[in-house]
Image (spheres, helix red, strand yellow):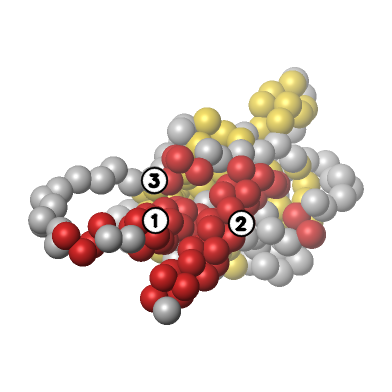
Amino acid sequence: MQTALADRLQVMARQRYNQAASALRARGFDPARFYTGQGGPLEPADAGDDADPRFRTLFMTWRALDQLETGAASIPSARPIVTSANFTSGYGVRSDPFRGSAAMHAGIDLAGPMGTPVYATADGVVGRSEWNNGGYGNLIELNHGQGIQTRYGHLSQRLVQAGQHIHRGQLIGLMGSTGRSTGSHLHYEVRIDGRAVNPIPFMQQPAATMAAPQRPATA
């Protein structure tokens, strides 16, 4: 009876593991990135513990699944703006609205009314909540673990402090036009190991594949 139950649980765990691993790969992550180190001290096992390897396999599969699902919480997978917002500038090379020359845009711009709520897109810890002279203006940077960060720039108000633990969907700031900006909008970035990547694939909602900008880009 117990071995039959272990077999059924193993199938369930393997299915969930495969689904979680596929979701991570779809966003460009190697599932191995989310496995934590293992170590002792270990207690001696009773002889009966190794009587049926199925129980040990089940334990290892569920532990790997738990690590994957915990790691997935660190991946930005929501929209920073939940109300209607205009997509005004995409990720990549674009024309700098101040200089008119080609420049790399490390995130996306979402425009809306001044004071529009801005939300965290994944669980994490506030790494920075400060004024930035490099063009971001009021900036919040969240560290999500596994080398993943998100940045929220040009805010009118910062509502969290460095060191604060944040949950996905938590209100962290208000949209503004501080720093190097031509109008009220949120500049949103996703960074992996310090390198900016396109945020759009990380945004779950179909609306994340918004239409091309309909008005001049903001900074």
Residue with the mark numbered 2? 19
Q: Secondary structure at mark 1?
A: helix
Q: Which is nearer the eye, 183 or 13?
A: 13
Q: Which is nearer the eye, 51 or 137?
A: 51
User: 162 left or right of 112?
Assistant: left
Residue with the mark numbered 1? 57
Residue with the mark numbered 3? 35
Q: Residue furthest top?
A: 101
Q: Which is nearer the eye, 202 or 27?
A: 27
Can residue 15 be seen here? yes
Q: Secondary structure at mark 3?
A: loop
Q: Position of residue 157 (x, y in %)?
A: 49, 61
Whether residues under marks 2 and 3 lie with C-beta atoms below 8 angstroms apart, the answer is no
Badge number at residue 138: none
User: 216 left or right of 166?
Assistant: right
Q: Position of residue 96 (x, y in %)?
A: 72, 28
Of mark 3 and mark 1, the one earlier in the sequence is 3
Q: Residue at x 11, y 56 (%)?
A: 43
Q: How many dots with numbers?
A: 3
Q: Nearer the viewer, mark 3 or mark 1?
A: 1
If the image is split into quadrants, where does the N terminus sit? bottom left
Q: Identity of the amino acid at label 2? A: Gln
